[in-house]
Image (cartoon, grey):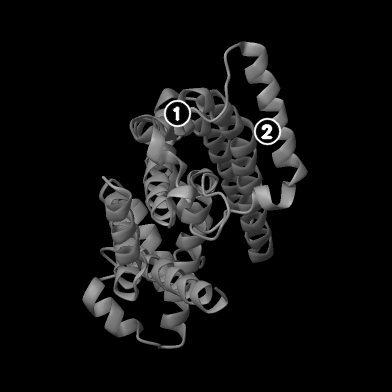
Amino acid sequence: MTTDTLTTITKLIQSPPGQLAAGGVLAGIVWKFFERVEAVLTDQTKLEIAVWLLGVKVGQKVEPWPDTFAKVFDRVFGEKHLSWKCFWRSFLASSLSWVVVFGVTFLVALGGFDSPKRHPYDTVTRQYWVAAIILPFVYAAGTAAFDYCSLLETRLALAIMRRSESSSVWSALLVIDLGITFITSAAAYLVWGTLVDVTAADWIGSIPLDIVPVVIQNYIRLLTLRLHHFGPTLLPYVPGGGGPTINIPFYASGLVTSIWLWLYAGSGFLLKAARRFDIGFEWFNQRFDIEKKPLQSIGLVAGTLVAVTYWAAVIVSRVVG
């Protein structure tokens, strides 16, 4: 695939119709994810989610959402965290998100080079393309260990939420969970990402690395450089914005469970608010049957939120840029 072809594809993706379609695709992916999760839930769990959304009281008590989400969470990753089942599913989730997001950022970033001088890969096309295919899986393999730790932290946060009925405690734990997973993702980028970068540099042809001491020396040097620019290093740069894009997949994979948690809670409360204030709830319920398909209903709202957020970010980037 030539640079001109990549540039053409990227321009199509970055065009208004392409951005509109991309937001729709993201919404569909989120919706389908919730749909697939709902397919493996027990009828009792689906009933409890519906009870929370519809506000039906059971024993004079409305089912708290952390309890229902914890059951969904356990169904997906398994009830025991220290098990091969949980590790394997965590590894699969983080790896898939890492590779997919890397593919998108790679395509956009590569298409952003507008001259041979700014496109250093023309002289090492074969090596670069092989590296582009292999390296994402190498990055993902090491990142999965950090994501597994983030998953444990999310489990602990949910356990605390289930023992509390305070909305303030729930809100605080949501913010804490997001912050910790963000820091863990940054650590994965700094520790593992830097190691992969320096060891792959010799093969790609950018830096001569022939012996282990040199690898260690370059690792320390690059890690020090990234720590020196600590603020910019933590920020997931927008592709095409002049900064690095390799850190974006680290955050995407590390924040998967936290984003899922936020989407579940936020979408659920939007549905409950719509019911309370009678804002299109009956229309929505008639078409999507919240009682029988509660998680799909949440997924539809969550997908819409993701699409709207994406489109808003695109509009802001175009205005600011």
Residue toward you, 44 or 102: 102
- Quadrant assignment for the N terminus: top left
Q: For mark 2, give the secondary structure.
A: helix
1 or 2: mark nearer the eye: 2
Residue named by callout 1 = 138
Residue 157 spot, x, y in % from top left: 61, 47
Amino acid type shown at disc 2: Leu
The amino acid beneath tag 1 is Val
| Residue situated furthest front in the rendering | 117
Q: Which residue is mark 2?
A: 222
The quarter of the image holding the C terminus is bottom right
Asked if residue 160 shows in the view, the reply is no
> At which x and y percent is residue 111?
38, 55
**Image height check: is 60 above or below 218?**
below
The spot of residue 147 in percent (x, y) is 53, 37
Answer above or below: position of 20 versus 43.
below
- Residue 5 location in percent, x, y? 27, 54
Q: CA distance from mark 1 to mark 2?
A: 18 Å
Dot placed on the residue nearer the N-terminal end, 1 or 2: 1
Q: How many marks?
A: 2
Say above or below: 210 vs 295: above
Q: Is residue 17 left or right of residue 169?
A: left
- The residue sitting at 47% across, 79% down in the picture is 273
Q: Residue at x 54, y 61 (%)?
A: 241
The residue positioned 55% from the left and 42% from the top of the image is 155
In this orientation, which residue lies closer to the viewer: 85 or 11?
A: 11
> Which residue occupies 52% across, 44% down?
246
Q: Nearer the viewer, residue 43 or 135?
A: 135
